[in-house]
Image (cartoon, rainbow, N blue to C red):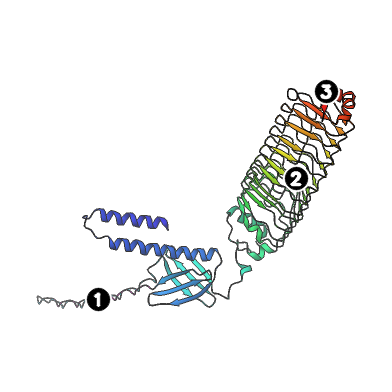
């Protein structure tokens, strides 16, 4: 349609340029405006067909018809004017008298003019039936729109955004052979199997119409590398293992409320994924769930989720701030390992263990408040957190694991609560800025190898005054006897 308008405008401009500068272009402008209106009417009609609209009224006017659709849009279809009758031919003249001259034949009557086509628009004709209206465009295309009250939405074909998705759906579930997938046919599907695995689909928002689908099976969309958008049905309850693994173009995932289970690795290596919403009905974010989602920057974990699984966000470098709801009682091993952009995280009060390696290589993490109920900070928990300046321990902490703060080169000061009984090997090794350690236990905690090696120059370890000699003589602590002072 746009090409037709372009050609007409070009032709009219050429005519005007060949005329004098005083040429009146009012007629040309009017013709362009009329053509634009005709194009708009056709676009409205095609939109009505594509979106399964109905016709609520057809009003006849002197010029033709006004057709109103169920979304409030209207179009005009004008009558064509009948062609004028041709003039009768003149009678033939008599032949001249001559030698046996014959009279001339009478002339034949002229033929009647042909009727004009309906409508001076790009809609050639309109035919109003009992249950629908048929439009024929000048291009030859036929468009049929049902009248209000005669339309069964469930029988209507789904308008797919992506033709590849449509083809796969039609091949799998077109039960009436019309080369379309209706809402009714989609609603009857209970298992999508491996129909889409490894395919080139780019969008599947129409999955929301598969209302009988309660589970997306394992590997269902595995390696659909061009898939950018998907919308889940409301009745969905589970998403299987590796269901969307390696969907490298997927941008956003909103898991619907009602889903109770996500499978392991279900969104692993979705490298374009930016936003995720985990509803309260999901109890556990599983292992490796968002592993390698390097662009994930916005994650909403709703109140009700109780476990963040091991390696679940490993390598999510774009994460900056994460809010963990108070319902979470466990963050498992290496959950945020190598989240290099993570700057801040609020840990819930319900957790009792900072598990092994959960913030290992979180190089942008600045400060941490360990919840008061935590009794163990496990091995490697904050290793290589090179921007970590401050850490605040809770009053119930008993064990600080090996390498837990190894190479935290920005950490300047720590205060170890009186409840601590064990400090692992190399715990604060290579904390090159560490200059002040406050150690409150009366009895020296068990200290393993090289816990305070490679600290800042003149680093001091202050202990209770009545315990100075105990610390200086205790195994492990004796290596730092010259640094031990009274609190």
Quadrant (top left/top right/bottom left/bottom right) for the C terminus: top right
Does residue 72 appear left or right of residue 442 in this picture?
A: left
Relative vertical location of residue 216 with respect to residue 352 in this rendering, above or below: below
Please name which of the two marks, 1 or 3, marks the residue nearer to the observer. Answer: 3
Does residue 429 appear left or right of residue 221 in this picture?
A: right
Local crowd size for mark 2, using a 10 Å CA cut-off: few (<14), some (14–19), many (≥20) = many
Q: What element carries label 1?
A: loop
Instruction: Report the residue marked by disc 2.
Output: 347
Please name which of the two marks, 1 or 2, marks the residue nearer to the observer. Answer: 2
Which one is earlier in the sequence, the residue at label 2 or at label 3?
Answer: 2
Query: Which residue is drawn at the image coordinates 66% and 59% (left, top)?
Result: 208
- What are the residue bounds of the magenta stretch? 79-95
Q: Is mark 3 on a helix, strand or loop?
A: helix
| Residue 174, quarter of picture | bottom right
Which one is earlier in the sequence, the residue at label 1 or at label 2?
Answer: 1
* Residue 220 screen position, x and y as percent: 71, 50
Looking at the picture, tell me which residue is in the foreground, 45 or 199: 45
Please name which of the two marks, 2 or 3, marks the residue nearer to the observer. Answer: 3
Query: Which residue is drawn at the image coordinates 40% and 65% (left, top)?
Result: 38
Q: Does the magenta stretch include residue 80?
A: yes
Q: What element carries label 2?
A: loop
Looking at the picture, tell me which residue is in the foreground, 474 or 405: 474
| Residue 414, quarter of picture | top right
Instruction: Report the residue marked by disc 1.
Output: 87
* Residue 226 screen position, x and y as percent: 61, 46
| Residue 65, quarter of picture | bottom left
Relative vertical location of residue 400 with respect to residue 166 in this rendering, above or below: above
Rounded to the nearest whole Å, what is the CA distance between mark 2 and mark 3? 33 Å
Rounded to the nearest whole Å, what is the CA distance between mark 1 and mark 3? 122 Å
The reply to whether the C-beta atoms of the residues labelled 2 and 3 are less than 8 Å apart is: no
Instruction: Report the residue marked by disc 3.
Output: 480
Local crowd size for mark 1, using a 10 Å CA cut-off: few (<14), some (14–19), many (≥20) = few
């Amino acid at each position: 349609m746009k090409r037709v308008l372009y050609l007409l405008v070009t032709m009219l401009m050429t005519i005007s340029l060949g005329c004098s500068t005083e040429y009146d272009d009012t007629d040309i402008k009017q013709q362009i405006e009329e053509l634009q209106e005709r194009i708009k009417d056709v676009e409205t009609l095609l939109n009505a067909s594509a979106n399964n609209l109905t016709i609520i009224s057809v009003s006849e006017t002197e010029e033709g018809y006004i057709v109103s659709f169920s979304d409030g849009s209207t179009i005009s279809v004008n009558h064509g004017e009948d062609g004028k009758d041709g003039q009768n031919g003149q009678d033939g003249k008599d032949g001249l008298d001559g030698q046996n001259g014959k009279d001339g034949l009478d002339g034949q009557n002229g033929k009647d003019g042909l009727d004009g086509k309906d409508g001076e628009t790009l809609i050639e004709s309109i035919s109003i039936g009992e249950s629908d209206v048929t439009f024929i465009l000048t291009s030859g295309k036929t468009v049929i729109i049902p009248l209000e009250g005669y339309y069964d939405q469930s029988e209507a074909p789904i308008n797919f955004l992506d033709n590849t998705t449509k083809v796969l759906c039609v091949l799998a579930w077109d039960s009436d052979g019309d080369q379309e997938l209706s809402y009714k046919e989609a609603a009857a599907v209970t298992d999508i199997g491996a129909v889409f695995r490894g395919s080139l689909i780019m969008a599947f928002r129409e999955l929301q119409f598969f209302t009988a689908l309660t589970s997306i099976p394992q590997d269902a969309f595995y390696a659909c590398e061009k898939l950018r958008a998907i919308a889940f049905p409301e009745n969905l309850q589970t998403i299987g293992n590796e269901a969307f693994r390696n969907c490298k173009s997927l941008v956003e995932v909103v898991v619907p409320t009602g889903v109770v289970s996500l499978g392991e690795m279900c969104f692993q290596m979705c490298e374009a994924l930016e936003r995720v919403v985990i509803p309260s009905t999901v109890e556990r974010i599983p292992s490796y769930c968002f592993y390698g989602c390097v662009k994930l920057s916005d994650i909403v974990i709703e109140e009700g989720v109780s476990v963040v699984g091991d390696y679940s966000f490993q390598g999510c470098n774009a994460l900056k701030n994460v809010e963990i709801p108070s319902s979470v009682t466990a963050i498992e091993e290496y959950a945020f390992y190598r989240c290099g952009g993570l700057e801040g995280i609020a840990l819930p009060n319900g957790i009792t263990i900072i598990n092994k390696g959960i913030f290992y290589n979180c190089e942008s993490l600045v400060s941490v408040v360990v919840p008061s109920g935590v009794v163990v900070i496990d091995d490697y928990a904050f290793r290589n957190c090179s921007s970590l300046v401050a850490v605040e321990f809770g009053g119930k902490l008993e064990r600080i694991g090996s390498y837990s703060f190894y190479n935290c080169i920005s950490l300047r000061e720590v205060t170890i609560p009186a409840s601590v009984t064990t400090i692992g090997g190399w715990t604060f090794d290579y904390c090159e800025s560490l200059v002040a350690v406050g150690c409150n236990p009366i009895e020296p905690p068990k200290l393993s190898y090289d816990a305070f090696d490679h600290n800042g120059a003149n680093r001091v370890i202050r202990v209770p005054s009545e315990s100075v000699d105990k610390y200086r003589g205790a195994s492990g602590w004796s290596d730092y006897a010259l640094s031990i002072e009274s609190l």
